[in-house]
Image: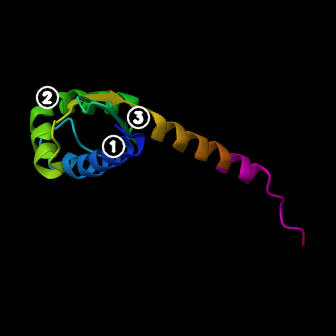
Amino acid sequence: MAEYKINRISEDVKRELTDILRTVKDPRVTGFLSVVKVDVTPDLSYAKIYISSLEGIEQTKEAVKGLKKAGGYIRRELDHRLKLRRSPELIFVADDSIEASADIARILQGLEKKGEKPDED
């Protein structure tokens, strides 16, 4: 299958998963969860979904456990919305990229404040 088609399907899955995550009722799936990346295999049998949270990697790992439990519901909703020939098996992976980028932003802001010169009167 052409790579552009796989990329398009990956983006469609990412968009729909972002919407579906809001409807999951598991108490572990709360807060600011974000779908960072979706990798779909060329035969559409598996989709690896990278999930990240602003609350830290531990909260993300708990959310991934909840998402694995709700995997059947999520897969069914995804199948209804996308109308693919084969509904991919979902593999959720905890990712700390959002937390890491927030840490880098805080460090840069700290450096920026240190680099400021006091106003001379």
Residue 112 belongs to the span the image colors magenta? yes
Q: Is residue 43 above or below residue 117?
A: above
First in residue order: circle 1 vs circle 2: 1
Name the N-terminal-most of marks 1 and 3.
Answer: 1
Q: What residue is disc 1 on? A: 10
Report the magenta residues as a range: 109-120
Asked if one can make out residue 35 in the rendered structure from this viewpoint, the answer is yes
Q: Which amino acid does label 2 sit on?
A: Lys
Q: How crowded is mark 1: few (under 14 residues within 10 Å), some or many (20 or more)?
A: many
Q: In which quarter of the image is the N terminus?
A: top left
Label 1 to label 2: alpha-carbon separation: 22 Å
For the residue pair 42 and 105, the one nearer the viewer reads as: 42
As drawn, is 30 to the left or to the right of 118?
left
Question: For numbered disc 2, what is the local secondary structure?
Answer: helix
| Disc assigned to residue 90 | none
Q: Which of marks 3 and 2 is in front?
A: 2
Instruction: Tell me the mark number nearer the camera, choosing from 1 and 3.
Output: 1
In space, the residues marked 3 and 2 are separated at their CA atoms by 21 Å
The tag on residue 69 is: 2
**Helix, strand or loop at mark 1:** helix
